[in-house]
Amino acid sequence: MRVYSGIQPTGRKHLGNYLGAIRHYVTGQEQAAAAGDESIFCVVDLHATTVAYDPKELRDRTYDTIAILLAAGIDPSQSVLYRQSDVPEAPELTWLLTSVTAHGELNRMHQFKEKSAQQRELVSAGLFLYPVLMAADMLAFRADRVPVGDDQRQHIELTRDIAERFNARFGEGQAILRAPEGVYPTVAARVMDLQQPEKKMSTSSGSVEGTVYVLDEPKAIEKKLKRAVTDSEDPPRIQRDVAAKPGVTNLIDILAATTDRTPDEVVASLADARGYGDLKVQAAQAVVETFAPLQERYRELREDEAAIEAALAVGAEKASAIAAPILADVREAMGVGPRR
């Protein structure tokens, strides 16, 4: 059972990234190791070039993200951790897969619609083809399971469609590419902005006050959670109701995810609470305690960029060793390059 997932290096990593993806990487790593297979994790710097960006900031954020993954528990001796631009097999596979990807499918992708609307000067072809590169990242390694946030379901379904279409057209009865299964968090699948709980927590479109960053100081975390928007119901009810009580629901989910409980267990534990303040205090304490060891380890790792590059070099070599024969199978099936 091979596990694969990629993460953007752009922006500062926040609580939603951690609960929706990063902590599940560690679980996936353990599951893959138990099954005697690889877990593969990628920092997708090529994806970041599809919109306007600052080159220096991209490199710095890439190092930041690698250090956060390592601090969270990704073990390069147990998993493959690599930078997307270091492994050429997936970009080549991207071009080959465009032959079985429909223009209409890409035009309907939610992320393309959202990001293209934000571009003032240029909507790049790369932004349009972004989902094909994302699919190639997974398919180049014949991944079985892909832990992702709930907002990535459309990309997983497109990847499965591309794999199945490729196999039907070029496979001659063989499954050359493997259609992966998405693995989605059951609790805190979507962490919402603390100030705008109808919107997903985000570094690009959310509010600074409503976004809890992985590297925020404890006092900043406490301040943001204690000021989280709830509602004006009197008396206040700590109840999970996404439609009627989005702010309260968000806090319940955050507390549940950071204390390894179900939302129902959290609600039951707060049956005698005096109001929303108790919920906010407990959520703040749980997030601070969750991030404390990660932040300490991050500070140690981030200072040594040479060590990060050394780890990435090892990861790139391992990744290419897995992807190269799969790309060779694709080239052979498509009649590209010399006959094997």
Image (cartoon, rainbow, N blue to C red):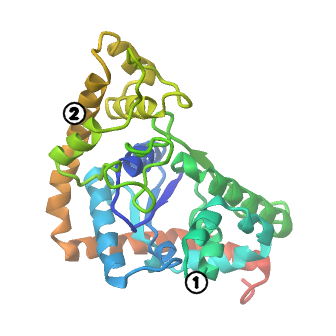
The numbered dot on residue 181 is: none
Q: Residues within 10 Å of mark 2 (few under 14, many from 20)?
A: some
Question: Which residue shows up at 36% across the image and 76% down it?
Answer: 58
Observer-nearest of 41 and 134: 134
The numbered dot on residue 122 is: 1
Residue type, numbered disc 1: Leu
Question: Which residue shows up at 29% across the image and 51% down it?
Answer: 72
Residue 19 placement: quadrant = top left
Question: Which residue shows up at 55% across the image and 70% down it?
Answer: 118
Q: Secondary structure at mark 1?
A: loop
Residue 154 placement (x, y as % from top left): 66, 54
Residue 113 placement (x, y as % from top left): 65, 65
Residue 222 placement (x, y as % from top left): 21, 40
Of circles 2 and 1, the one toward us is: 1
Examine the rendering and report whether any part of residue 305 can be seen. yes
Question: Which residue shows up at 30% across the image and 53% down it?
Answer: 213
- Asked whether, in this view, residue 153 is left or right of residue 40, the answer is right
Observer-nearest of 45 and 140: 45
- Asked whether, in this view, residue 270 is left or right of residue 33, the answer is left
Alpha carbon separation for disc pair 2 and 1: 43 Å
Q: Which residue is mark 2?
A: 285
Q: Residues within 10 Å of mark 1 (few under 14, many from 20)?
A: few
Residue type, numbered disc 2: Gln
Q: Please identify the quadrant where the C terminus is shown.
A: bottom right
